[in-house]
Amino acid sequence: RYFNVAGATERNGEDHEPETHLIPLVLRVAAGEATHVQIFGQDYSTPDGTCIRDFIHVRDLAAAHLLALEATGEGDSSFEVYNLGSAAGFSVREVVEAARKVTGRAIPARVVKRRMGDPPVLVASSRRARRELGWQPQHSKLEQMLADAWAWKLTHPTGYARPQRTDGAAVDRSTADGRSDRPVRGPGATAPA
């Protein structure tokens, strides 16, 4: 079991609708795609009054899966459950503030009513995975997860909607593989079908 997966690799990031995950929502505001991020309650019994959640970098999640596969012997039908997370957690305000630092952008936040059922703190204990698999998260520092997700967003401003260039411009799809170096012209231009 794992908690909030965040971060990105150079090729793969988070892009889905509707978006409900905190880090992509915060980065949408940083990118100018939304006016503000909502903070659901500020009266929780936490240091800053906002919910605390655990996050894990997608690279650390992948590494844990590989370790679990390696630990499973040929024909082994046993079933083990491991929690995967940072074991620390970050508050919603901490995520927003760290995103401001990482992106260098203002990220307006509005406090709204609590969501029913949101616990104040939800953090994973990864002790068993660390002990039995030797798993150690290498990328799950908040700033690293945000920086990787932000880098992917900047190079994939439309997500997976169409192929991207490394400079973030849309590519010409008139070639069979969509890898033309010719950028699509004009604001909001779509690539030829």
Image (cartoon, rainbow, N blue to C red):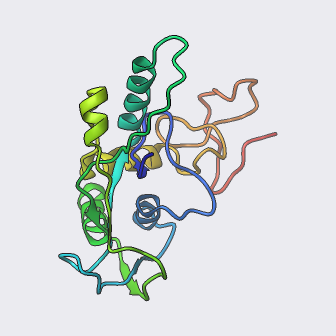
Quadrant for the N terminus in the image: top left
Q: Between residues 42 and 107, which one lies in front from this camera angle?
A: 42
Who's the residue at 24% across and 80% down the image? 45
| Viewer-closest of 20 and 12 | 20
Which part of the image, by quadrant, shows the C terminus? top right
The residue at the point 41 percent across, 65 percent down is 26
Q: Nearer the viewer, residue 52 or 19?
A: 52
In front here: 24 or 170?
A: 24
Going by the image, does 106 lie left or right of 163? left
Residue lying furthest left in this view?
Answer: 47
Residue 33, above or below 5 = below
Residue at position x 53%, y 51% in the image? 157
Instruction: Residue 104: give x, y in percent of width and height.
Output: 27, 60
User: In the orientation shown, which residue stands out farthest toward the top?
Assistant: 74
Relative placement, left or right, of 192 versus 128 is right
Residue 65 occupies which quadrant of the picture?
top left
Above or below — where is 26 with respect to 67?
below
Residue 132 spot, x, y in % from top left: 29, 29
Q: Residue at x 61, y 38 (%)?
A: 183
- x and y, in percent, of residue 57 in the image: 36, 43
- Percent across and percent down for residue 116 are 49, 82
Up the image or down, 108 lies above or below 164; here it is: below
